[in-house]
Structure formats: C-alpha cells, structure tokens
Amino acid sequence: MEIDKDSPIPMYHQLYGILKSKIEKDQMKPGDFLPSENKLAKMYNVSRLTVRQALSELAEEGLIERQRGKGTMIIQPKNIENLTELKGFTDEAHMTGHSASSVVIDNKLVDAPVTLLEKLNLPVGSKVVLLKRLRLLDKIPYAIEWAYINPAIDTRVLNILEMDMSKSSLYEFFRKTLELELQYADETLEVTLATSESAKLLGISLGDCVVLRKRFTYVYDEKCVEYVQSLYRGDKYKFNIRLRAR
C-alpha cells in the first residue's frame, strides 16, 4: 500500500493504517522491530514528522513500544475486558480466546478483616476463606487476586479449602456446585504502583503502574458472597466501558 497524497485523510493516519494492518495480519509480529523513522520516511515518501505521528497513534493503542537504544518494537496487544457484564477472570479469558490458569499462593481460613464485616454481614471473629492466586493468560502473569469468600452464604464454601483452585473457576463453583445466581457486583478501579512483592509475581519492575480493582459480589437478598481485590498489569490490560445516554 502507498500513501495517497491527494487523499483528504491525513498522511500520518494513512501510514498508521498501513502499519496497523500489517501488525493485525501478522506480517509484523510481537518482538519484531519496525524500520527506523528515516527508513519508514523513505519507504513511504513522507516526512519524519508524519512517521512520528503515525507511530504515536500505534503506541497509544498499545501496539508498539519504543525501546531506548534498540528502536520501535511490536508488542503483544493488551487484553481488553468489557466492564458491562459480571464475569470472572476465567469467563473473560474464554470469551476472548485466551487460556486461563492460576498459581495458588494461599487457600486458607482466616479471620474476616474488620473492614469487611459490615459488607459481609458478619460478626467480629467470623472466619472467611482467603483464596490468593496469581492469574495467568496464555501462561503470562496478568493479575494477582485476593478473594475473601463468605461461608455464611453457604457452608459448602469451605469445600474450596480442599479443591485444586489452580485449575478450578471460582465463579463456576458458585454457579454449578452451590447453584448461586450472581446478581450484581460493585466495583472500583484505581491506578497504583507495584510493590516489590507484586512486581516480582507479575514479572514487572518495582514502581510500574498497576490497576487496583475492588469488587463486592452479591447473590440473593443482596447478600455479599465475596470481596475480591486484584492488581492487574497496566502494560497488559485495558478496560472498556460503554456509556449510554439517558
């Protein structure tokens, strides 16, 4: 494809479209480096400024990354999660064509954190199941998840302690074993920085940006069955929300 200089479409946007098409058609793959700005300018008979604008658009979409001293590399596109439906990590992975797996860090009975007692409608001293897992997509670490699960909803929640949760889906357990219908969830997202522990688990650098998600999930009679706190890699994940006009 060539740049049409008579087109009403800006040349930088045409170049962006050409390069994006090559990436999407696997003509350029993650790990490959783009030609230099000078070479791209000569290849498409445009200015370096036009090339820079096109590369900036690709970078904003998370398709390329500029590496100092090396050049511009094609990177794996971020996984996109649509925040319009209540789904678990495994559900979302399957819907987007990925393979989900987990490394169980903790699966134990703990005192319910005082800050959660009111939401879980539990008295002081109550026990909950803490399930902490490193969540992976296609064997790549994407998130760390702390799930506090409420046995007061159904005592069979305690069966989780005996299950291999590296292979099992928590939401599938809720739906199929406990026959619980998840009604809705309240969730917040904020950007924070990776600590030394989270950076090591996620395979990122200390101080890199991560997305902190906090979710309270409710079943019948507005009873809270779980509180989940997650840290998602900022370089691997992005969230999509559709807003409707009134």
Image: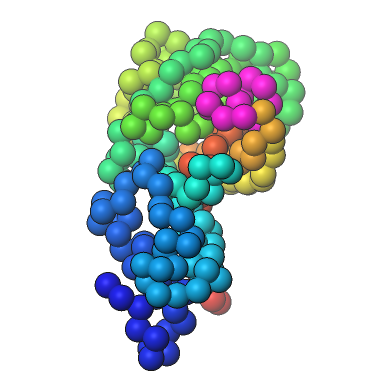
142 or 71, which is in the foreground? 71
The stretch of residues the image draws in magenta is 194-205
Residue 4 vs 177, above or below: the answer is below
What colour scheme does the image use?
rainbow
How far across and how far down the image is residue 104, in percent? 46, 16
Using residue 182 as the reference point, say whether residue 98 is left or right of it: left
Using residue 115 as the reference point, say whether residue 82 is left or right of it: left
80 or 86, which is in the foreground? 80
152 or 74, which is in the foreground? 74
Evaluate whether residue 117 shows in this view.
no
How far across and how far down the image is residue 79, in percent? 42, 46
Q: Quadrant of residue 100?
A: top left
Evaluate whether residue 163 shows in this view.
yes
Q: Quadrant of residue 103?
A: top left
68 or 109, which is in the foreground? 68
Classify the position of the N terminus by image quarter.
bottom left
At 37% from the left and 71% from the top, the residue drawn is 44
At 41% from the left and 52% from the top, the residue drawn is 34
Using residue 179 as the reference point, say whether residue 49 is left or right of it: right
Number of numbered tags placed on the structure image: 0
At 31% from the left and 76% from the top, the residue drawn is 2
Q: Quadrant of residue 124?
A: top right
Residue 11, magenta (yes or no): no
How far across and how far down the image is residue 128, in percent? 58, 18
How far across and how far down the image is residue 62, in percent? 48, 52
Residue 212 vs 112, above or below: the answer is below
At 45% from the left and 11% from the top, the residue drawn is 161
Residue 195 vs 212, above or below: the answer is above
